[in-house]
Amino acid sequence: MPAKKTKRVRESQVEMTELVLPNDTNQLGNLLGGRLMHWMDICAAMAAGKHSGRVCVTASVDEINFLGPVKLGQVIHIRASVNRAFHTSMEVGVNVVVEDIHTGYSRHVNTGYLTFVALDETGRGVQVPEIVPVSSEEKRRFEGAFTRRNARLKRRKLIEANEEARLRTESKKKKKVG
Ligand SMILES: CC(C)(COP(=O)(O)OP(=O)(O)OC[C@H]1O[C@@H](n2cnc3c(N)ncnc32)[C@H](O)[C@@H]1OP(=O)(O)O)[C@@H](O)C(=O)NCCC(=O)NCCS
């Protein structure tokens, strides 16, 4: 069966729930930021994998802000949605909510944007289906993803230029020593 050229957001949405256990926390009993980022990455990778039907690698993660502590024993709900697909890459939006299952209290903890690239068996990027946004919320995220992608690619160019400059300086230094 030929691969679909377009897909809806809900076809690849993934929800993941985790109970915060002692091994996930710091000395204050607060969830470690790195643990939360790991869960966000896994949840987002599953959504990208479902959308593309491929193994996907994380190309970049936008700034993540932790809006408040999450305590030992609380429950984390993570929802990942493919906001927009480009050629081989996809922006996945991740929404994190903390819940106290004893009191019913819940609060938004953070939102993250991760970019994944779909790869074939040889490790080369492959074209992914387009996203067809349906709801007004999906349309808003779809539009936002375009602006965020441009900002990311500009940043990547800057990083590459800095790296090239660093390598040039290093090689000049080596020549002087030699
Ligand atoms: C991600 C990776 C496949 C990109 O390949 P590349 O040859 O460097 O990049 P390309 O210029 O061919 O771009 C491929 C796609 O990635 C996108 N991309 C690359 N870097 C990006 C970044 N920093 N942010 C957002 N998108 C990015 C490009 O826009 C392009 O998307 P498109 O095909 O939809 O237009 C490659 O850099 C890689 O394998 N990185 C390591 C991934 C990994 O191991 N992640 C886990 C972290 S340890």
Image (cartoon, helix red, strand yellow):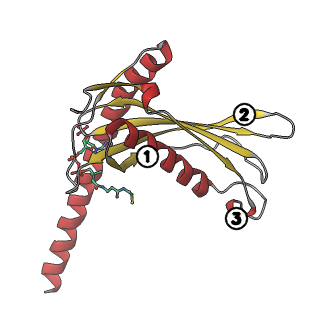
Residue at the extreme top = 136
Disc 1 marks which residue? 45
Q: Nearer the viewer, residue 96 or 66?
A: 96
Residue at the extreme right = 103
Upstream in sequence: badge 3 or badge 1: 3
Which secondary structure, mark 1? helix
C-alpha span from label 2 to label 1: 24 Å
Label 1 near ligand 1 (CB < 8 Å): no
C-alpha span from label 2 to label 3: 22 Å
**What amino acid type should be assigned to the residue bearing mark 1?**
Ala
Direction from residue 114 to residue 131 in the image, left or right: left
Could you say where residue 150 lies in the image, as x and y percent from the top left? 30, 32
Q: Nearer the viewer, residue 150 or 26?
A: 26
Against 171, residue 28 (above or below) is above
Q: Residue at x 60, y 51 (%)?
A: 36
**Which mark is on residue 107?**
2
Against 79, residue 123 (above or below) is below
Direction from residue 139 to residue 22 in the image, left or right: right
Against 143, residue 16 (above or below) is below
**What amino acid type should be assigned to the residue bearing mark 3?**
Asn
Could you say where residue 96 lies in the image, as x and y percent from the top left? 61, 38
Q: Residue at x 17, y 65 (%)?
A: 168
Disc 3 marks which residue? 23
Which secondary structure, mark 2? strand
**Which mark is on residue 73?**
none
Could you say where residue 49 lies in the image, as x and y percent from the top left? 38, 43
